[in-house]
Image (cartoon, rainbow, N blue to C red):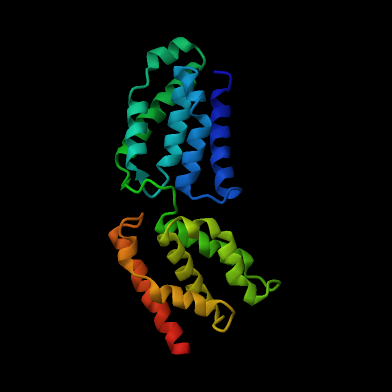
Amino acid sequence: MATSYEEYLEYINETYNEFKEEGKMSNKEAIARTFNEYDMSMKKSETDKAVISVTIAEILISHLRILNTFKDYMINTISKLNFKLIEQDNELSREQHIALFIRREQVLKQLDNKPLDYYPRVCWYYEELTDEVNKFLDQINTGIINKDEIIAKVFKRFERDCKNTLSEKIIVCTTLAENLLNLGYTRIEGLQKIKQELQLFNVEDICNEQLIEGERKNLVVRIDNVLEQLNNIG
């Protein structure tokens, strides 16, 4: 194992966070890209496989849901780790060996309890994307920015996501409209286009995407509330 135990932990988490922050990726895409980055390294030795797979699984359990096939793969890989072979590799101290075994046992239990995601495409989850749009709006809504630029900046930031799934596009539109209404920005350029987008939305069109039933229902309620407020404005 050319990379040390501690370095793997640091590098894997750094890689994941870079995909999220610099690549502006969802958790689901960031962990998939991180796994691909270290997939070949897992084949170097049983120790490399153990350290990498357990560390990636620890990130994975922080997600709202886990893709069913990825969950099965990770559980299968981690549960079959050979700790006698890891000991023979002689690449970890006794303390590191024990710590890794404990981490393995803990993460297996946590993986087993995580809700499943059956949508294969990488995408944002409902709460995750809503929070991300809210966070971005807080960052750009300063006295420096022209109010009429807000909508364009939001759609530029989430351009790739809005093209990915209809669910993501509608979540962005709804969350953006909610913020604009709360701020009293009811006459800015582009708001009527968002209204038209929400009016044309049919929840049946996203039944086969990543949102679960409760999330779809909640989204419809939010859209109805936004449209009611926009209609009252005229």
Q: Quadrant of the N terminus?
A: top right
Residue 99 is situated, as x and y percent measured from the top left of the image, at 44, 25
Q: Which residue is drawn at 47% across and 19% down?
A: 47
Q: Residue at x 29, y 62 (%)?
A: 214
Along the line of sight, which residue is nearer the eye, 214 or 4?
A: 214
Is residue 182 visible to us here?
no
Residue 60 is situated, as x and y percent measured from the top left of the image, at 42, 41
The answer to which image quadrant residue 70 occupies is top left
Q: Which residue reaches farthest right?
A: 144
Residue 15 is situated, as x and y percent measured from the top left of the image, at 57, 38
Along the line of sight, which residue is nearer the eye, 209 or 220?
A: 209
Residue 110 is situated, as x and y percent measured from the top left of the image, at 34, 39
Q: Height in image: 61 above or below 102?
A: below
Q: Which residue is drawn at 46% across and 55% down?
A: 164
The answer to which image quadrant residue 155 occupies is bottom right
The answer to which image quadrant residue 53 occupies is top left
Is residue 166 visible to us here?
yes
Q: Height in image: 72 above or below 153?
A: above
